[in-house]
Amino acid sequence: MNRLMLIAASILAVPTFSVQGQAADKASTASAGKHVYDHWCAPCHAAGGAHHPGTGALAFKYKGENIPAALEQRTDLTPDVIKTFVRNGVSVMPMFRKTEISDAQLDALAAYLSHQPVKSPATTRKAKRPPA
């Protein structure tokens, strides 16, 4: 009987570790994304308008609309939009090379600013087409 209870407890404990691991991964990713944001983005895009030219430019651009200028306050940014702006730049915002912000750091940043979990490379790869 004790053996049966031990097996049952072991089976029930496995999903708990998985959920806890996912929560820890999400917190770790958010922390990594926040670190990238604080180092590379906040000098221009933090809240505070006049002291942050990116935030000031977005405030001017979205004047009269209900869109926050500070990036951390936005809820409409998707990971793909964030990655496009970071890698290509826009207006006076420079592009950031992979030697400055790695792909993994960019994934964490995009997850942080879009408030979405990071997708692993395996889930984001496109299926290869068979040769014609």
Image (cartoon, helix red, strand yellow):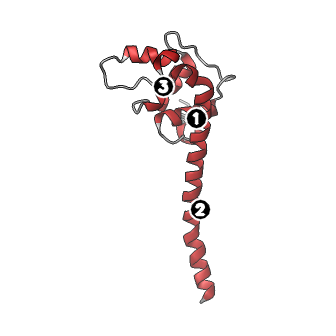
Quadrant of the image containing the N terminus: bottom right
| Sequence-wise first label, 1 or 2 | 2
Say whether marks 3 and 2 touch (CB < 8 Å). Answer: no
> For the residue carrying disc 1, how many other residues have a C-alpha within 10 Å: few (<14), some (14-19), or many (20+)?
many
Q: In the rendered structure, which disc, 3 or 2, sits on the residue that comes first in sequence?
A: 2
Residue 108: x %, y % from top left: 58, 36
Q: Residue at x 47, y 34 (%)?
A: 114
Residue at disc 2, secondary structure: helix
Q: If you read the primary sequence from the N terminus, does the residue marked by circle 3 or circle 1 appear first?
A: 1
Q: Secondary structure at mark 3?
A: loop
CA distance for labels 1 and 2: 25 Å
> Is the residue 131 above or below the residue 22 in the image?
above
Residue, x 53% and y 29% (percent of image)? 132
* Amino acid at the residue labelled 2: Phe
- Badge 3 density bin: few <14, some 14–19, many ≥20, Cα 10 Å: some
- Viewer-nearest of labels 3 and 2? 3
Q: Which one is nearer the viewer's eye here, 60 or 99?
A: 60
Residue type at mark 3 is: Ala
Task: Give the residue type at disc 1.
Answer: Lys
Marks 3 and 1, Cα distance to the nearest angstrom?
14 Å
Q: Quadrant of residue 21?
A: bottom right
For label 1, the residue is 34
Please, is residue 45 above or below residue 92 in the view?
below
Give the residue at mark 2: 17
- Compared across the picture, whether 80 is left or right of 40 comes to left
Mark 3, residue position:
47
- Report x, y in % for residue 82: 50, 26
| Residue at left offset 58%, top offset 35% | 33
